[in-house]
Image (cartoon, grey):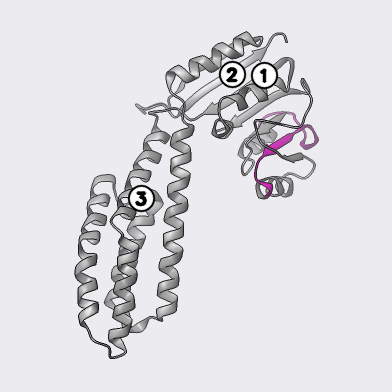
């Protein structure tokens, strides 16, 4: 078995629990050396390779099963064909792929919209200025800059409230509500805080929001629409694969699909 874009090894853990595959029969591929080091620690005996999913340094036909769960599509559709190349005749390709318009896609899209709106409102730079002038006022400086900073921050606070009202308080993994609440709490007890600690925390939150935005953007871009998924299935057919399952996977009780489910068998080269 080879697992592509293995991440934290979630697929490997399931495979070891449900099949007779031994650790030594599993190879994991990921572009992150940290991810490979982690799965090698978790599952001693597996073979971990740091590699681009578009150019895996392995020969054709060496595996019976190739898997990926929300990972290989980040490298583009050609990475799916690269995985297919690694399978022997009779081998199985089994993947869950991000689906455009699905539940995960909607959550990521909402998170991305919420974060972008907060960043465009300059919430963190304005809060930083409020605290800088506030700490100065606590030490005896003129309050006018502090009062002005408060007025400038007010529209950004309103925007944060509007974002949470539209998307819910838990949008973006609670990052926005945590930032909003903590800024209010610190502001109400400003003399009790150290300036370097507060300003450093705001810098960290700014980096966290930017990183989160990048992840959400990558996830939405990786999602496949109907036409793209159908082209992938058609090309796999041209490469000698028979589709066993090629459809949206929609959990019971949900309206939106979770993923594209792709299972295909290699009949010939």
Query: What is the crowding at mark 3: few (fewer than 14 residues within 10 Å), some, or many (at least 20)?
Result: many
Q: Which of the two marks, 2 or 3, is nearer to us in this view?
A: 3
Q: Is residue 152 left or right of residue 217?
A: left
Residue lying at 37% horizontally and 27% vertically, measured from the top left = 256
Residue lying at 20% horizontally and 60% vertically, measured from the top left = 155
| Image height of 202 relative to 136, above or below | above
Region rendered in magenta: 18-33
Residue situated in front as seen by the camera: 103 or 158: 158
Q: Circle 1 — which element? A: strand
Query: What is the crowding at mark 2: few (fewer than 14 residues within 10 Å), some, or many (at least 20)?
Result: many
* Real-space Cα separation, disc 1 to disc 2, in angstroms: 7 Å
| Residue bearing mark 1 | 92
| Residue bearing mark 3 | 115
Mark linked to residue 263: 2
Residue 110 picture quarter: top left
Q: Circle 2 — which element? A: strand
Can I make out residue 247 in this image? Answer: no
Residue lying at 44% horizontally and 17% vertically, measured from the top left = 227
| Image height of 211 relative to 135, above or below | above
Residue 186 picture quarter: bottom left
Circles 1, 3 touching at the beta carbon (< 8 Å): no
* Real-space Cα separation, disc 2 to disc 3, in angstroms: 35 Å
* Real-space Cα separation, disc 1 to disc 3, in angstroms: 40 Å
Circles 1, 2 touching at the beta carbon (< 8 Å): yes
**Which quadrant does the N terminus fall into?**
top right
Percent position (x, y) of residue 8?
62, 44
**Which quadrant does the C terminus fall into?**
top right
| Image height of 122 relative to 83, above or below | below
Circle nearer the N terminus (1, 2): 1
Circle nearer the N terminus (1, 3): 1
Circle nearer the N terminus (2, 3): 3
Q: Circle 3 — which element? A: helix
């Amino acid at each position: 078995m080879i697992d592509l874009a293995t991440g934290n090894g979630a697929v490997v853990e399931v495979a070891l629990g449900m099949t007779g595959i031994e650790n030594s029969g599993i190879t994991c591929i990921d572009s992150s050396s940290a991810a490979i080091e982690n799965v090698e620690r978790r599952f001693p005996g597996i073979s971990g390779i740091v590699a681009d999913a578009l150019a895996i340094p392995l020969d054709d036909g060496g595996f019976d099963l190739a898997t990926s769960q929300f990972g290989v599509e980040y490298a583009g559709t050609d990475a799916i064909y690269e995985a297919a190349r690694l399978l022997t005749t009779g081998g199985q390709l089994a993947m869950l792929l991000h689906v455009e318009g699905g539940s995960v896609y909607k959550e990521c899209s909402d998170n991305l919209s919420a974060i972008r709106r907060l960043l465009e409102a300059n919430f963190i730079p304005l809060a930083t200025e409020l605290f800088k002038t506030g700490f100065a006022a606590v030490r005896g400086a003129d309050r006018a800059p502090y009062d002005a900073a408060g007025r400038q921050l007010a529209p950004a606070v309103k925007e944060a409230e509007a974002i949470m009202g539209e998307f819910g308080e838990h949008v973006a993994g609670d990052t926005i509500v945590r930032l909003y609440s903590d800024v209010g709490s610190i502001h109400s007890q400003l003399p009790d805080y150290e300036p370097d600690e507060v300003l450093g925390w705001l810098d960290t939150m700014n980096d966290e929001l930017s990183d989160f935005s990048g992840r959400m953007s990558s996830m939405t871009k990786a999602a496949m629409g109907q036409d793209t998924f159908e082209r992938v299935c058609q090309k796999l057919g041209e490469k000698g694969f028979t589709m066993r399952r090629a459809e949206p996977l929609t959990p019971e009780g949900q309206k939106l699909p979770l993923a594209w489910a792709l299972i295909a068998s290699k009949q010939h080269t």
